[in-house]
Image: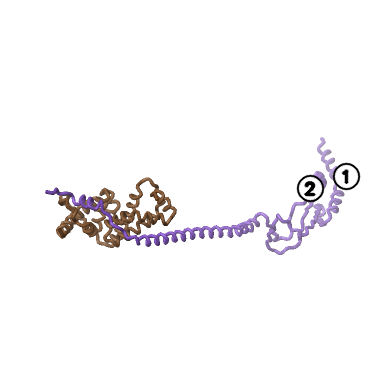
Amino acid sequence: MELRELIKKAKKNNREAQAELFKRYKDTLYFLSIKYCHNQEDAEDNLQDAFVTIFSKINQYNGKGSFEGWMKRITIYKAIDRYKQKNSHEIPISQTHIHEAIDTEIKSDLRHIPLSTVIKCIQELPHQYRMVFNLYQMDNHSHKEIAKLLSISESTSKSNYHRAKLLLKERLSQGKSETPK
Amino acid sequence: MKEKEDIGKIIARRLEQESMVADEMLWQSIEASLDKKRKKRRWFLWSILLLFVGGFGSVLTFLPSEKHTTETLTAPESHSVETSSQTIEVPITISKEELANSTANKDDKTTDNHIIAVQEQPKKENRTKRVNTTKPDTTTVVTTTYHYYNNSTGEMMNTHKKETIDSILNSEKNVLDNGKIKDSVQKKKSENRP
């Protein structure tokens, strides 16, 4: 069935159409959730919330942009909501500014590091660093947009991004050395 | 020798072509959540509908009683008659002939004598009774009493018969026509002559 037809049926609360849309996009959105969330369970919960919101608000999708992009945005916003809920109970991380000149470069050889290791390194980042890194690096948001989304300052967003890269470099270097040849 | 590259870009490129498989069982919990949400929505809509119907019903039941209240409230202002005293002066319906007669009598300078027509009503309790004028009270018997007061003699006469009063007035008129007034007028005329 065509995507347009599926969306039309899903708008009329057709369960089969909704199930078909779930089947088509569950992996993409799950992988997105995995990057933004702290662990697998959290990612699954986020995916569930995202799909419930997608099907509840599918009438708001006017068909102008990409449907996948629209669903991805909802999934990211859901992850941000979860982060904000958790962050309200946590002690805020240090906002010390890091100089731009700090070396975050690495020899571009990550192909031999397993995907699970890369994902684990991202997931183990402090929550705010992980959110900023994903939003900036993976989903091409500007620091201004990130500041607005996460209710932080632009400079904090920049420093969080650099800190995240430093931590990733450090952990991936270790992972690389641990990887059996 | 490999060139150094930004770690962020390397990771982004590494993850670009990857994907992970989500558990299909997730659909069941999503479906359950959707059902729950739909039930909540239905419940909300029903409660709004019930509230609306209830409100509308109460307005409908309240309206007639409100109308009744306004009627009873406005009635005393426009229609009620205070009957604390026993007699009430009301206008008498007089035929054209009678009216002509009475005006003629006035012209005959019988100004000292007054006809007072009083409508006497049966005794009522000394309390306010609200009478609806749109529905005339057929049980009340109205009798008219005519009073004749002679100023010169100081006599007061009460009768239910109008003819009696008329005959007195006619006799008085004849007397006046024939005698006193004419004489007095002639006297005045002679006095005025030089």
Task: Tell me which label, 1 or 2, sits earlier in the chain.
Answer: 2
Say which mark, if any, is on residue B111.
2
Residue A30 horizontal/vertical position (percent): 30, 57
Q: In the rendered structure, the residue with mark 2 lies on which chain?
A: B
Helix, strand or loop status at disc 2? loop
Say which mark, if any, is on residue B178.
1
**Disc 1 and disc 2 on one polypeptide chain:** yes
Quarter containing the C terminus of chain B: top right
Q: Is residue B37 left or right of residue A154?
A: right
Q: The chain shown in purple is which?
A: B
* CA distance for labels 1 and 2: 17 Å
| B85 vs B20, nearest the viewer | B20
Residue at the (87%, 45%) spot, across then down: B179
| A46 vs B46, nearest the viewer | A46
Residue at the (71%, 64%) spot, across then down: B125
Mark 1 crowd level (few <14, some 14–19, many ≥20, 10 Å Cα): few
Q: In the rendered structure, the residue with mark 1 lies on which chain?
A: B
Q: Tell me the amino acid under the disc marked 1.
A: Asn
Residue A93 horizontal/vertical position (percent): 22, 59
Chain A: colour as depicted: brown
> Furthest-bottom residue in view?
B125
| A74 vs B28, nearest the viewer | B28
Q: Tell me the amino acid under the disc marked 2.
A: Thr
Helix, strand or loop status at disc 1? helix
